[in-house]
Image (spheres, rainbow, N blue to C red):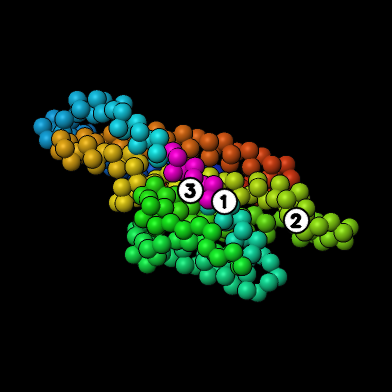
Amino acid sequence: MPVNPIMKGAATPLGAAAATAGSALPYRKRRRTGAWIVSIAIVTILATLALDVAHTRAINFAAVPRFLLDPRILAGVKITLVLTVAGLVIGVLCGLLLACARLSRIGVARTLSATYTWAFLSVPGLVQLIFWYNLAIVFPHIHLELPFLGTIWEGQTNAIITAMTASMIGLGLHEAAYFSEIIRSGIISVDRGQVEAAQSLGIRSRTILFKIVMPQALRVMLPSGMTRVVALMKDTSLVAVIGGGDIMTHAQEIYSDNFLIIELLLVVSAWYLFMVSALMLAQAAVERWASRYQRSSGAAPVRSAVVEELA
């Protein structure tokens, strides 16, 4: 009986592989067809929504460009940047102190640092802002006393803790808890043998920290630190609740007069997209630099998620 050439080829390993590949082709085609169907459905839904929004009369799109460069909005952008820088400075300085206390040999300092980090990471930033803004309820007056000299300075809390001051304090102390963990992780990542070698040479602890440990730890801390800066800039919108003067505060004041709520929210969104995108570009550059250093030193590349905490 003559043997079918195709069946004869299938009996060999090469023929079996060809038969397997041939049987997999319909599955691949079905999978590719399904992906195309899903993609077309998603594009259709998004296009329909975009057309509905574009043709709606409920949104005055012509007002959006007019308010983008409104002096009040620009003043809010300036305050937003000031709050970001102030919160970053306070957060880094206090975070450094907390990290050093957490790594110290003093048990009380470690406990206080851990308690601070636990408390400020657990309580939402909005709650902390409202607390600092209403500090006068608990302490109507703030005064400074020195031994043997008595009260050398005193003032009313409401006059000292303004909306702007409360915003800086609230954002800064909230970020300090995050930066303390970032700094502590960076310090721990440095080889302990280098610290011990420096100690054996009689180098002071402060010199070891700032001359040996921190330059190396900085390359590990920067990616995560940049992520927190991005989150901090977005968190500045929370100060609108206490009238902190940021871009959201001014937008609320404007749409409370003209009732263009969605239009002003689009303006605020456009400004945040611009500012956060600039920070994310800087973050990507920092991560590439840190990863190149890690590869050159033989360590694993350092990467932090660019979209982390975007919610």
The spot of residue 225 in percent (x, y) is: 55, 48
| Residue that protrudes farthest toward the front in the picture | 149
Question: Measuring 68% from the left and 45% from the top, which residue is drawn there?
Answer: 294
Q: Which residue is mark 2?
A: 206
Q: Position of residue 25 (x, y in %)?
A: 40, 42
- Extreme left residue here? 57
Expressed as whole percent of the image width and height from the top left, the position of residue 71 reads 31, 28
Dot 3 or dot 1, earlier in sequence: 3
- Provide the residue designation for mark 3: 87
Q: Which residues are magenta?
A: 81-90
Residue 255 visible in the displayed image: yes
Q: Earlier in the sequence, mark 2 or mark 1?
A: 1
Quarter of the image for residue 196 reads: bottom right
Mark 1 Cα shell of 10 Å, populated few (<14), some (14-19), many (≥20) = many
* Mark 1 element type: helix
Between the C-alphas of marks 3 and 2, the distance is 25 Å
Dot placed on the residue nearer the N-terminal end, 3 or 2: 3
- Frontmost residue, 27 versus 54: 54
Q: Is residue 155 magenta?
A: no
